[in-house]
Amino acid sequence: AEPPPPPPPPPDPERLATDFLAGIVLPPVGDPPEADAGAGEEGEAALSKTAAKKQRRREREEAESVAETPISSGVGHALLQKMGWTSGALGRRGEGIVEPVRAEGAVGKRGLGGDS
């Protein structure tokens, strides 16, 4: 049997770097175009504050709608049902709480226990 041919020589590192850099497309050099020349920095800051406020409001509304939706599907629900859980009050005799405990977020920069 004839021995296998020798492996090809390793690629030249300089050639690899040149080929890699040639494939990178850089943005043009210079000042970026301004969206609104009359807005200035104050307009941009106000826009970002307004956008952030709207985003927080959307997130809060979405969280509230999710919290109000009863859980009637999912892996956790299926596992609980397989273990004998039925909806309603908790506890052996059904004397426990019916509504879930609500978690409230901190207001401002106060941490846990900031209200007390």
Image: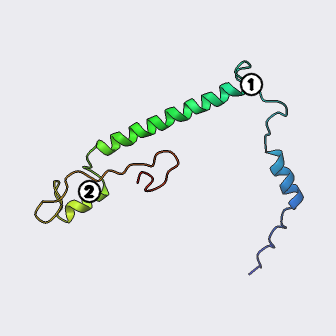
Q: Nearer the viewer, residue 73 or 99?
A: 99
Q: Picture coordinates of residue 80 (x, y %)?
A: 23, 61
Q: Amino acid at mark 2?
A: His
* Residue positioned most to the left: 93
Estimate how packed mark 1 is, as few (under 14), some (14 to 19) or many (20 or more) residues with alpha carbons within 10 Å. few
Picture quarter with the C terminus: bottom left
Q: Amino acid at mark 1?
A: Glu
Query: Is residue 106 found left or right of 31 in the rendered image?
Result: left
Label 1, secondary structure: give it: loop
3D distance between C-alphas at marks 1 and 2: 52 Å
Find residue 77 and name its label.
2
Look at the picture and state if 59 lies above or below 84: above
Using the rendered view, name the quadrant where residue 61 is placed.
Answer: top left
* Residue positioned most to the top: 38
According to the picture, the residue beneath numbered tag 1 turns out to be 34
What sort of colour scheme is used for the picture? rainbow
